[in-house]
Image (spheres, grey):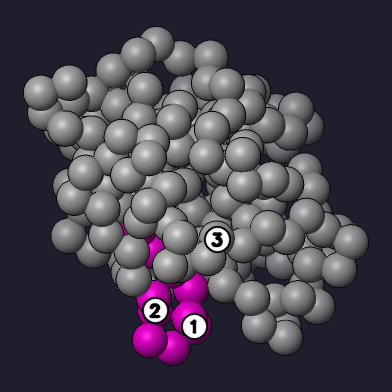
Amino acid sequence: MPMNKAHRRLCSSEKWAQGVRDRLLPWALEDVELGDDVLELGPGYGANLRVLVERVPRLTAVEIDEATTRLLQDGWGERARILNGDASDLPLPDAAFSSVVCFTMLHHVPTKALQDRIFQEAFRVLRPGGIFAGSDSQPNFRFRLLHIGDTMNTLPPDELPGRLAAAGFTDVSVDRHPESGGLRFSGRRPRGE
């Protein structure tokens, strides 16, 4: 997992999990219909997963870090399918999910090309009419301090709509949080595909 020790401590904390539950996910998923079979990309220590598993009938999570995957399997494996894998090369079939989500993980992807590959993979595994939605952070002083020694490749909000459209998504929406400045996004796989 490309995070320094302080960053790992924060993201595995109960304080972070509470913020995800109370603020981040309600904002990021406002007006998003997840459907019956959801895929989460990059769940990390599981703060989002803990909320999603209560909201959706079926949840699959793909985590790139093997040790973190085992941690999630131990904690949530009876309620969600947890897979070790790379979101830019998903070990999953085409058109399998009603929605794909990812939260505060894309800035840990080292290159724009790999981020775009994740968008393409999200599109591939979505059912026609399915939605890809999520959120990510934007740089500020505190965010930069937290990422010293980490991979930090934030998404330029003005570029994101075009990048999602290039992956095939329609009905693309990108906006910024009025207080934190973070961004949320969504796009749909067209029903006719």
Q: Residues within 10 Å of mark 2 (few under 14, many from 20)?
A: some
Q: Which mark is residue 165?
A: none
- Please tell me whether residue 84 belongs to the stretch shown in magenta: no
The front one of 131 and 114 is 114
Q: Is residue 114 left or right of residue 157?
A: right
Q: Is residue 178 left or right of residue 170?
A: right
Residue 137's spot in the image, x, y percent? 56, 68
Q: Residue at x 26, y 53 (%)?
A: 172
Q: CA distance from mark 1 to mark 2?
A: 6 Å
Residue 125's spot in the image, x, y percent? 36, 22
Q: Residue at x 28, y 18 (%)?
A: 95
Q: Is residue 8 among the parts visible in the rendering?
A: no
| Circle nearer the N terminus (3, 1) | 3
| Residue wearing tag 3 | 155
Q: Quadrant of residue 44?
A: top right
SS under mark 2:
loop
User: Label 3 sits on what residue type?
Assistant: Leu
Residue 121's spot in the image, x, y percent? 45, 27
Q: Residues within 10 Å of mark 1 (few under 14, many from 20)?
A: few
Q: Is residue 5 left or right of residue 36?
A: right
The main secondary structure of the magenta stretch is loop
Q: Residue at x 18, y 50 (%)?
A: 171
Q: Is residue 179 among the parts visible in the rendering?
A: yes
User: Label 2 sits on what residue type?
Assistant: His
Which stretch is magenta? Answer: 176-185
Please report contact status of discs 1 and 2: CB closer than 8 Å, yes or no.
yes
The front one of 112 and 122 is 112
| Circle nearer the N terminus (2, 3) | 3
Q: CA distance from mark 2 to mark 3?
A: 14 Å
| Residue wearing tag 1 | 180
User: Label 1 sits on what residue type?
Assistant: Ser
Q: Residue at x 31, y 34 (%)?
A: 168
